[in-house]
Amino acid sequence: QKEVEQDPGPLSVPEGAIVSLNCTYSNSAFQYFMWYRQYSRKGPELLMYTYSSGNKEDGRFTAQVDKSSKYISLFIRDSQPSDSATYLCAMSLAYSGAGSYQLTFGKGTKLSVIP
Amino acid sequence: ETGVTQTPRHLVMGMTNKKSLKCEQHLGHNAMYWYKQSAKKPLELMFVYSLEERVENNSVPSRFSPECPNSSHLFLHLHTLQPEDSALYLCASSQDRGDQPQHFGDGTRLSIL
């Protein structure tokens, strides 16, 4: 079983739709959870960063973490064509000293928002 | 300049060449990372440096040789690479704490002929 599972898509939605992106993971020791957005020919850009379980909202984006189910989600409201990108989930263990802050990534979901 | 800058953006090299990738961060961070991104695979961590000391080498072949002369600069020296090494190589930096995220550069697209 892979450590982090993420459906690669592609996912295509009309402009204005609510988008739901998800990752599941197997290691219950993960403590920090992130979503990155990666446009074509660019590096990953941090979107959301959460610690442990719960919800976090930032504008049109909401990140949810359910540690009991080992499941994280990113919701995008009122999706725009500019949201078209690949979305990567990432997570890490609790910090335990120099260099221990290492990320485990999903494969990424490619999203297209159609005008 | 701000953020994490990588040069060159594109590199084509033969299997017998030697080249280097460069990364510079302007964020005041004390940890730097090299990742490999291949199609249809998750990002793979290659090397971790914390306070200029190499902390992690995730079983990377010796044809990849990292160098971190100070906390702002990171290099990846390449020699006698294989076609399967063609990929996007990403550099990232962070504060070496568990509550600070990693920030990425735009990568070097490497093609091995």
Image: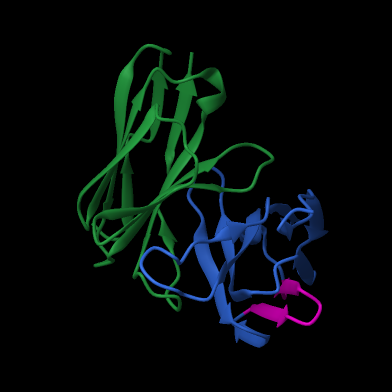
Which quarter of the figure has residue A65? bottom right
- Colour setup of the view: by chain
Can see residue B106?
no
Start and end of the magenta stretch?
A60-78
* Residue A67: in magenta span: yes
The image shows a total of numbered marks equal to 0
* Residue A71: in magenta span: yes
In terms of depth relative to the viewer, which is nearer, A38 or A24?
A: A24
Residue farthest to the bottom, as pictured: A54
Picture layout, residue A16 above or below residue B82: below
Q: Is residue A2 left or right of residue A89?
A: right
Query: Measured from the top left, where is residue B3 in percent x and y?
Result: 32, 60
Dominant secondary-structure state across the stretch colored magenta: strand
Residue in the image at 71% along x and 58% along y? A3
Residue in the image at 24% along x and 56% along y? B52
Query: Measured from the top left, where is residue B92 in percent x and y?
Result: 40, 55
Picture layout, residue A108 above or below residue B88: below
Q: Which chain is blue?
A: A
Quadrant, the N terminus of chain B: bottom left
Q: Is residue A35 left or right of residue B57?
A: right
Residue in the image at 24% along x and 67% along y? B28
In terms of depth relative to the viewer, which is nearer, B56 or A85?
A: B56
Which quarter of the figure has residue B70? bottom left
Can see residue A103?
yes
Query: Measured from the top left, where is residue A26 in percent x and y?
Result: 75, 65
Picture layout, residue A28 above or below residue A113: below
Q: Is residue B82 left or right of residue A108?
A: left
Which quarter of the figure has residue B96? bottom left
Query: Measured from the top left, where is residue B110 in percent x and y?
Result: 45, 28
Residue farthest to the left, as pictured: B70
Name the tint of chain B in the rendering: green
Q: Is residue B4 left or right of residue A28?
A: left
